[in-house]
Amino acid sequence: MRVEYAPDRAFCRIVLTKQFQGWSEIAHGGIVSTLLDEIMAHAVFHHAGMALTARLNIRFRSMAPIGKPLDVTGWIDQRKKRVIEAKGEIRLSEDKSLVAQGESRFLLTGDPHAAVS
């Protein structure tokens, strides 16, 4: 993943290859979950500091096709001292239809005010 950052989020565009396939021409759900966990982690690391995933919830909305660009976005939703709530989503690049949504809880491991660049 080549992640980029905006003032309030982390994002990337990715095309999954057949090695990430579950069923024919469809990405495995574990890969979709991993993409969401990673993008939310990038948002947290970049904007809040080093943290560990404590909880991860994924809602699958439609299939993630192999060979088509996907837009993966993550952002911080809430911050309470050392606990960060993050959200993320994956959409098809071509029509912006929703593929999956994620919600996670991260625990900051160090200085809660230090962000990672």
Image (spheres, grey):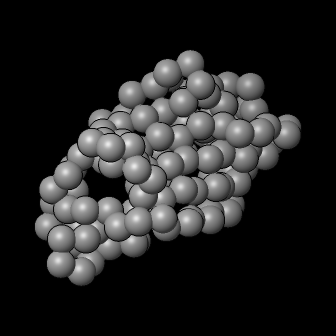
Residues 97 and 36: in front is 97
Residue at image point 74% right, 25% down: 113
Point out the image quarter for the N terminus. Answer: top left
Q: Is residue 33 left or right of residue 23?
A: right
Which quarter of the picture shows residue 72? Answer: top left
Residues 63 and 79: in front is 63
Residues 90 and 40: in front is 90
Camera sees residue 87: yes
Residues 103 and 3: in front is 103
Q: Is residue 62 left or right of residue 81?
A: left
Residue 54's place in the image compared with 26, above or below, is above
Q: Residue furthest top?
A: 7
Q: Position of residue 69 (x, y in %)?
A: 24, 46
Q: Position of residue 5 (x, y in %)?
A: 46, 25
Which quarter of the picture shows residue 47? Answer: top right
Q: Position of residue 102 (x, y in %)?
A: 57, 56
Camera sees residue 38: no
Q: Residue furthest right?
A: 81
Q: Position of residue 101 (x, y in %)?
A: 54, 56
Residue at image point 50% right, 49% down: 89
Q: Is residue 97 left or right of residue 22?
A: right
Residue at image point 25% right, 62% down: 65
Q: Residue furthest bottom?
A: 23
